[in-house]
């Protein structure tokens, strides 16, 4: 006779792409999401990773691992009782919250939203991800050069030294120029060029651009 509580101990996960594709993942399975994932999305989006993230059951709950080295995603509760949300950065592993949630992310080509439904939460190792080599390569995102790396480090340094500090600690253009031994004009040009590259990658750029770059760099460093 089956134990009626077993489904509560090891609950399935329901994943839905809101475009007609839904799948129930049992605890003994795992699922990869991306252009070449077992749950395939964005097959024609050259900016989306072939394997973007992976979901599996750990024995204590459902986990999500971001396999990207650059893209992040957000998990937000869909429950009317809670408004919790969390950012999952590159290479991060998180516990998927119980109940209904929405996973959102975007590339320069489009925005994505997937719905998860998890009745319970609980840790194990995922199966090894094997990527088919006959698929086309992921479109390369901007990689900062040495000047851009130094620029972002100078802007983000106060935020990294004082977590929780407000934007008043972000150095001015003149202060950054003095730190790097550049002219103010050169510093402004470097900032604008870097911002344009990141905007092409799909980053949500805002002004002042030095504040955006400071927070962007600090987020990448953490």
Image: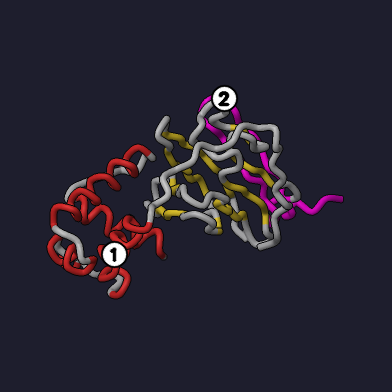
Q: Residue at x 23, y 69 (%)?
A: 165
Q: Position of residue 220 (x, y in %)?
A: 40, 59
Q: Position of residue 147 (x, y in %)?
A: 32, 57
Q: Is residue 106 above or below residue 164?
A: above
- Which residue is denoted by mark 1 in the rendering? 156
Q: Is residue 76 visible?
A: no
> Which residue matches tag 2?
20
Q: Is residue 28 left or right of residue 188?
A: right
In depth, the one of 186 and 45 nearer the eye is: 186
Of marks 1 and 2, which one's residue comes earlier in the chain?
2
The quadrant of the image that shows the C terminus is bottom left
* Mark count: 2
> Residue 21's x, y, as percent?
60, 28
**3 or 153: which is nearer to us?**
153
User: In the image, 55: left or right of 189?
Assistant: right
The answer to whether residue 130 is left or right of residue 49 is: right
Q: Residues within 10 Å of mark 1 (few under 14, many from 20)?
A: many
What residue appears at the point 25 percent right and 53 percent down from the top-left corner? 212
Q: Residue 27: tell me if it is visible.
A: yes
Q: CA distance from mark 1 to mark 2?
A: 43 Å
Q: In the image, which residues are magenta?
A: 1-27
Q: Position of residue 73 (x, y in %)?
A: 45, 47
* Dot 1: element: helix
Which mark's residue is nearer the viewer, 1 or 2?
A: 1
59 relative to 83, above or below: below
Q: Secondary structure at mark 2?
A: loop
**Residue 14 on the magenta span:** yes
């Amino acid at each position: 006779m089956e134990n009626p509580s077993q489904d509560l101990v090891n609950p399935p996960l329901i994943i839905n792409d809101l475009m007609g594709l839904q799948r129930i993942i049992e605890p003994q399975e795992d699922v990869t999401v991306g252009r070449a994932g077992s749950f395939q999305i964005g097959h024609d989006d050259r900016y989306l990773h072939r394997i973007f993230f992976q979901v599996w059951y750990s024995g204590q709950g459902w986990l999500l691992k971001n396999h990207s080295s650059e893209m992040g995603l957000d998990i937000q509760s869909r429950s009317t009782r809670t408004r919790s949300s969390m950012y999952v950065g590159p290479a991060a592993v998180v516990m998927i919250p119980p109940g209904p949630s929405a996973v959102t992310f975007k590339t320069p080509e489009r925005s994505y939203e997937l719905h998860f439904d998890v009745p319970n939460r609980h840790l194990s190792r995922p199966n090894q991800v094997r990527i088919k080599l006959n698929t086309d390569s992921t479109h390369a995102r901007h990689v900062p050069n040495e000047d851009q790396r130094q620029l972002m480090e100078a802007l983000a340094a106060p935020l990294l030294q004082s977590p929780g500090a407000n934007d008043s600690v972000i150095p001015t253009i003149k202060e950054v120029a003095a730190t790097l031994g550049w002219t103010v004009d050169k510093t402004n040009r470097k900032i604008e060029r870097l911002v344009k590259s990141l905007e092409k990658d799909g980053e949500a750029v805002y002004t002042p651009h030095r504040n955006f770059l400071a927070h962007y760099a600090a987020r990448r460093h953490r």
